[in-house]
Amino acid sequence: MARLFGTDGIRGTYGRDLTPELTRELGGAAVRVLARAHDRPPTLLIGRDTRPSGRALEDALVQGIVEAGGDAVLAGVVPTPAVAFLVPGLGIESGIVISASHNQPQDNGIKFFDGRGFKLSDQLERQIEDEIAAGGGARIPQGEVRALPPDAPGYLDHVVGVADRSLEGMRVVVDCANGAASAFAPDVMRKLGADVVAINAEADGSRINVGSGALHPEVVAVAVVEHGAHAGVAHDGDADRALFADEEGRVVDGDQVLAACAIEMKDRGTLTRDTVVATVMANTGFHRAMDEHGIGVLSAAVGDRYVLERMLEHDLALGGEQSGHVIFLDHATTGDGLITAVRFLSLAAARDVSVGELASVMRRFPQVLINVEVADTERLSGAEEVWEAVRAGEAQLDGTGRVLVRASGTEPLVRVMVEAETEEVARGHAEALAGIVARELAR
């Protein structure tokens, strides 16, 4: 059986890669695996984003869970990190999020959290896959379905509580990508005293991530200028990431956020081991800024689960990636876009500086990223002509930039990234290399 789980759960086109029948089997398999791990029938909390296919997948998942003897608690439409927060607070065995994160509306996905609120281990994911392949067990309709209890821990209060200070006097544009952030992110900013302009907050799942949100931060950047705002925040479909725009409409990426927060935490003495985790995509400017401030950097593969693994391995408090996933381990067990927004904006307010000034702690080297659709990402490792071109590009840059080619863990794409001192040089190398990748792997 081919692997179902990628770097961030199961993801694919609804009705083709991810069907209600597969989802029902998945729910049953998860219950049986977790029951063996905990020596009791598990309870699973289910949240979802706004995608049209979410309800059908939720129904199928619940059916599989209760048929296998587990209980299902329905949280409805909530951000992914809210599920990670609620599971340990409720004292239950697992959480499930039905979401394809930053993918387009036709896609959907399923990701699991364990009882501590961390992404499910590779070992347990493999056991669930093996359980499905084995054909499952008898159906015993004995589980229960119930709503989230009214005394559940308050996620919004938790997010508001991580602020350094209020956002009184700050006008903030919040782009919710028509996703799970729609009913949450604007309220968080308002609770902190900000004057909020909410855009793409209709929770219309048929338009989730379409020309909006963290995939298109230029949209919130334009809106900041139009509304005379002090800052903008852009979330993705499940609200586990955040990108920003400053008062002049310049995009602020995850590297800049991570750099500013790392420096602030070091100054306060809360940056454990004076070290931060970033991914291999981190900008050269990020590394230089960290070096200037005496902060060590550990590199991880792309994906917040790999960032978290490195953080836990070395007992570190902060990690993140350029795409806007930032993990503040003192406050969350996964990337949380709302917490990232509160921490970054309230830091600017506490220091009485603009968002642009806060982000200027690092100089961002131009990066060009090109996504190449391919037939089989696994062929990349053996594509010698591609790797010869990578080596040639690195030799031409001669220490003034870098080249990174990697397969996506969630989509049939190879990502080609080139960083150089000028965008013109970076784009020239990236386009040439992307052409070679397309020629070698797109057939």
Image (tube, rainbow, N blue to C red):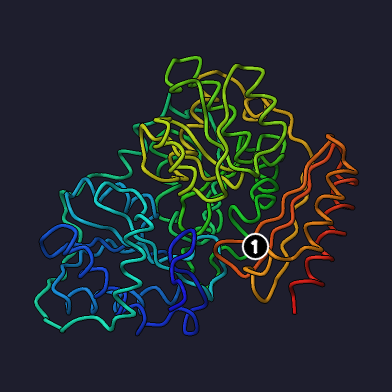
Q: Residue at x 54, y 47 (%)?
A: 174
Q: Nearer the viewer, residue 380 or 235?
A: 380
CA neighbours of label 1 inside 10 A, class few (<14), some (14 to 19), many (20+): some
For residue 64, above or below residue 222: below
> In the figure, residue 113 lies in which quadrant?
bottom left
Tally the marks. 1
Residue at 64% across, 41% down: 253
Is 120 on the left or on the right of 316, as rendered?
Answer: left
Viewed as shown, does residue 134 lie left or right of 279?
Answer: left
Residue 432: % across, % down: 87, 59
* 229 relative to 336 in the view: left or right: right
| Residue assigned mark 1 | 211
- Of residues 302 and 172, the one drawn nearer to the viewer in this rendering: 302
The amino acid sitting under disc 1 is Gly
Question: Regarding mark 1 in the picture, which secondary structure is present there?
Answer: loop
Above-or-below relation of 262 to 311: above
Residue under the point 45% across and 71% down: 3
> Is the residue 104 above or below the residue 425 in the image?
below
- Quarter holding the C terminus is bottom right
Residue at 67% x, 53% y is 219
Q: Where is residue 375 in the image (x, y as percent from the top left)?
A: 67, 76
Give the x, y percent position of residue 165. 43, 24
Which one is nearer the viewer's eye here, 393 or 274? 393
**Screen quadrant of the N terminus:** bottom left
Q: Depth check: give the residue in front, 183 or 398.
A: 398
Q: Position of residue 67 (x, y in %)?
A: 17, 79
